[in-house]
Image: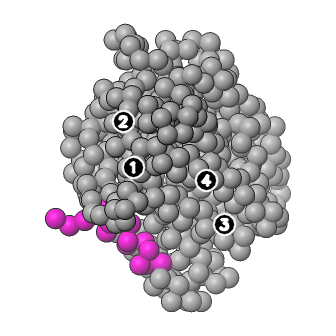
Amino acid sequence: MIPVLTLLTAIPGVAGLLALMAGRRAGLAKAIAIIATAASLVLALRIWFGLGTAGTMQFVERADWIPTLGIEYHLGVDGLGASMLLLAAIVSLMAISASRNVTSNPGLYFALMLLLESGLFGTFTALNFFHWFLFWELSLIPAFFLIKLWGGEGRGRAATQFFVYTMVGSVGLLLSFLALYLAAGSMDFETLAGMAASGELATAIAGHLGPISLWLALGTLLGFAVKVPLMPFHTWLPATYSKAPTPVTMLLTGAMSKMGVYGLLRLALPIFGAQLAEMRMPLLTLATLTVVFGAWAAAVQKDLKRVFAYSSVNHLGYCLLAIFAVALPSGSSAATALSQTAALDGVLLQMFNHGLTAAAIFWFLSMLESRSGGGLDINDFGGLRQPAPVFCGLMGIALFSSLGLPGLNGFVSEFLIFRGVFPLTWLSATVSVLGLLITAAVILTVIQRVFTGPVPERWKAFPDLTASERFTVAPALILMAVLGLMPQLILGTVNATVMHWLAGWRL
């Protein structure tokens, strides 16, 4: 059998070496990157459509690596992993397509973009902590250099802040899982989750290390809280998103931010579900603050990239709210289990929807930035729908998707999250609705300030989208509409995975 997961991870890595060899030949380097990301998308689609409906791990690859240390080469995907592979492949192709006029060392630029894609694929497929952690860190390195070398003014500080914050979180993860290995003798995610469900893991930790399970859960949470991010660990994000090259920001918000949510679902809930239940109320409070204050912070920004950076914090806050809401003590009723299922279905759908929508919005911001000479102050525009009606119309679709307009993809996932969370914690859900209202005000303000009103003299000749630009952005917008009307295209697969989780987790 062809090792499709290994092949998927290897394609962008090998292509990155070829792009690097292209050197200063920007056209060749970009062509290599386009071909590689397109091939990766085809293979990700093959994995998605080949996934079974049992909700268990599929396309499993397993071989001994360092058996004396419990390290295996163990790959596999379920509905969560396959959806994230598909999202990463789509967003990577979008980001490469948006990378125009890369004149400074284009070979290295596209090589780093492809290496980042390879790191994402590895993170979403690895099922052994040692192997998984290598790719978790691998994705950090190219992102740092892409920001540091091709970012805007102040990029050095933003890149360093991004690196330090993420590295501190990674240290917490590493220490926690080294302790788990000492206690349980395994680094395999499925083995650890099974031990946690039976209660064997808690007994092993207490017997070997003492009563430190809660501290191990906190160390694990730290790594993922920084990555999502959960307030107050979010302060690296606005500067990073605003100073990074916009195609890199597309990857950061569209795919890399999902690594934190993925880790909570793949590691934290299955292994530390009981500990998360103990910390449920403080975590729900932080998630609610992330939702509300993320939206509020977006409302007071002037730079459009910072507006949507904080909006990203808000939208991923809904995922955190649902994840912490389902962390209940075991022995829940059938009605509670139904709410947990709806909430987790909403999380998986929200991860995909937000990644697609946020990447598209930053793609439009990239086009706006290039046409305006680099400026993205919200007060510098106005009336652009007159000289550029196609640009404003298509960007408006992405904006309304972010707002959660019924008929587009953002509405369904947010509805499912609130449908599931409200019976589980009505107070957190009620307060978090403020985030929806503020987000609507933010999006409508952007539309009003940028698209409507009188046209300033300098924007009367603002160029509309070219035919090639319309062609390249159209698939993402069509997918938003399709998923808004037929969310079962994603839910039909991920629901089986959620049901399998809830049957096995010790919550």
Mark 4 and mark 3: Cα distance apart in space: 15 Å
**C-beta proximity under 8 Å, tags 3 and 2:** no
What residue sits right under mark 3 in the picture? 144
Is residue 167 a member of the stretch shown in magenta?
Answer: no
**C-beta proximity under 8 Å, tags 1 and 2:** yes
What residue sits right under mark 1 in the picture? 186
Give the secondary structure at mark 1.
loop
- Coordinates of residue 249 in the picture (x, y in percent): 63, 58
Front in this rendered view, residue 48 or 400: 48
What residue sits right under mark 2 in the picture? 195
- Coordinates of residue 424 in the picture (x, y in percent): 50, 14
Front in this rendered view, residue 504 or 444: 504
Q: Which residues are magenta?
A: 1-16
Give the secondary structure at mark 3.
helix
Mark 1 and mark 3: Cα distance apart in space: 31 Å
Q: Amino acid at mark 4?
A: Ser
What residue sits right under mark 4 in the picture? 170
Of the numbered discs 1 and 3, the one sitting upstream in the chain is 3
* Callout in the foreground (1, 3): 1
Q: Which residue appears at 44% of the width and 36% of the height? A: 204
The reply to whether residue 355 is visible in this rendering is: no
Find residue 6 and report its image quarter: bottom left
